[in-house]
Amino acid sequence: MTETVFVVGIDGSDAGERALAFAKERAKAVGNCTLVLCYVIEWSPFSFQTKEENEMRHKRREEEISLAHSRVLDPAVVATADDDVSVIGVVKHGDVAEILDGLAKKHGAAQIFVGRVGIRGLKERVFGGVTGRLVASASVPVTIIP
Amino acid sequence: MKNLLIAVMLAVLTPLAAFAQDASLDDKINDAFASSTGWFVSLIFSPLPFDVAGSSFPWIVMWLVIGATVFTIYFGLVQLRAFGHAISLVKGDYSDPNDAGEVSHFQALATALSGTVGLGNIAGVAVAVSIGGPGATFWMILAGLLGMASKFTECTLGVKYRNEYDDGSVSGGPMYYMTKGFAERGLPGGKVLAVLFAIFCIFGSLGGGNMFQANQAHAQISGIVGDYPGWITGVIFAIVVFLVIVGGIKSIARVTEKVVPFMGIMYVLVALIILLVNYDKIGWAFGQIFAGAFTGLGVAGGFVGALIQGFKRAAFSNEAGVGSAAIAHSAVRTKEPVTEGVVSLLEPFIDTVVICTMTALVITISGVLVVDPATGNYVLNEAGSAIQTIDGSSGVQLTSAAFATGFSWFPYVLAIAVILFAFSTMISWSYYGLKAWTYLVGEGAAKELTFKIIFCLFVIIGAAAKLGAVIDFSDAMIFAMAVVNITALYFLMPVVKAEMNSYFARLKSGEIVKHK
């Protein structure tokens, strides 16, 4: 039986937790399943920064990655892994929709699970929220947990 | 803590500002500066011992032209060959997704540009065109194109020889490539050049990067709201600069970083609209630019006058060869120093070839320069030093008047743009000055604070006093940076060539791959 991969987006929120719990349930039901948990740090290479920010950027990036691991990702990986499901944890910088779909492609995932993120501001009303963009652009089925 | 710092700052600065406003003190400072530094200014701007086409020619202009030409030839027209690749790099086509979150090429370019796009593009071009005629534009564009090779050289070296510290921060720039690069090649004198460069850079940052900006910003504000004491502008600017560079109020800097590119784009768009509305005159304007470039069309100094103005203002505006950009670009964490050099060559292109040319075309087309209908030549002012303008304005006011022929409201937008540009240039140069300062005196919170406070004091002096001699001196300092920097670039250019050849060979062979 071939291995099935699910990509799960987590962000430390309750919705993310629910998405992870739901994905784990599915994974157990499917059997021989790997969950790729991903925490995305929102980042655009086209934002404007000051010279001091540029100078300290590398250090900040390392700090952001280590915080994401220690506060959200590593506890989630530990809590999720058991005999039936194997778990990989990834932290990435970039656009959430792009990163999750990229991971799905890379691991040949069957599905992406995310928690629903409410529309937060004017920008998202105009350009669509993260989940909306993910649904619009994903190459595999996306399950959104309310 | 921040409030305490601000209170102390205000207590120190207010009496000092009032003092600086004192006319007799202005005169004293002027006289003291002129007598102690005049020799340096004369040395930097002294003419060549022989006349060029019947006119005297400052050697420093020749120095910049020769430098840029040598780099252009030595690197085989890298500005043309690598132009497309530069755009791919900025778009992120070659960025490794695993490095996401580090400073991108786009961010490095945008940050460096926010330091160079400014008064040079608005006031400097107006000065060049009013003194040198539209023909100055031709030489300015040529200087911009040649300057791309100088930028490529210095920014590649800046990244290659930067210092990376244990805490992950980086420091780079001419000081570092002079010491480390010279030592690596077994050449003597690297340390001497580095110290000289750092000294000139500190004075350049206090002068052209600070006092001149504060002075012009005050001139612009008082032009709109009416005349009032300069120290008021100075104190306000000093407080905001203080909040950003000492208080670490990043939000102000971040707002500036966002608004400045927006202003730059808006400036170009408005210029384009004016040009489109007057599309029938564009051919004529280019005709004036080409004819003026070789005949001068009656301006003082003939075509040499046009050439000197064009080259001088291009250098002021895009800072190619000055070495400042190498400091800004060295923060990028790339495995290939050449990529940063390639990206940086877009800077003189955007700054000079695009933005400065827009200003020059609008001034030429708007008809603010007075032409003698009988001869077709430009009419000089009474002193014979510059072309007569319809309302007698010069500098920023001339650009303002030219844009107002298209959009009557534009002078207000331009005034805001000038103030923001001046502010962002100050913030940029405070960073360059600080890097030079810490190179000389060492890193440390107290040492850095000392420089930052000195920097803020100079904002007030710059806005309050009319210090012609001080400004001459600071301009001379920025050119002095170029003397030291280009000297070092000549010795280190083989290093850049080896890097460049290796990089482009790997790019061609497919070893360096696109990620998008």
Image (cartoon, coloured by chain):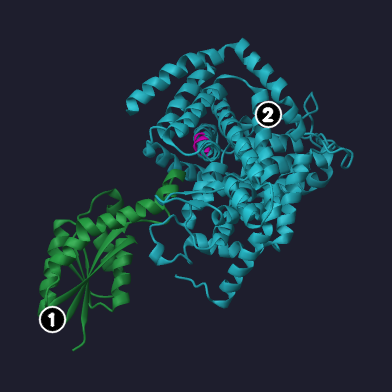
State the image coordinates of residue B451 (x, y, percent, origin top left): 50, 31
Where is the C terminus of chain B found, in terms of image quarters? bottom left
Q: Quadrant of residue B407?
A: top right
**Residue B283 in sight from this viewpoint:** no
Q: Is residue B304 magenta?
A: no
Which chain did the renderer colour cyan? B
Identify the residue under disc 2: B472
Tell me, for residue A30, which label it has, or none.
Answer: 1
Residue B295, compared with residue A136, is above or below; it is above
Q: Residue furthest bottom?
A: A1
B222 left or right of B284 in image: left
Q: Which residues are magenta?
A: B423-428
State the image coordinates of residue B31 (x, y, percent, origin top left): 69, 17
Please tell me whether the stretch drawn in magenta is mainly helix, strand or loop.
helix
Q: Residue at x 34, y 28 (%)?
A: B2
Task: Report how many numbered discs are placed on residues in the image.
Answer: 2
Q: Residue at x 29, y 62 (%)?
A: A96
Which residue is at the front of the view, B94 or B390? B94
**Label 2 marks which chain's residue?**
B
Find numbered disc 1 in the image and state the secondary structure of the residue it sits on. helix
Find numbered disc 2 in the image and state the secondary structure of the residue it sits on. helix
Which residue is at the front of the view, B152 or B401? B152
Mark 1, Cα crowd under 10 Å, few <14 / some 14-19 / many 20+, is: few
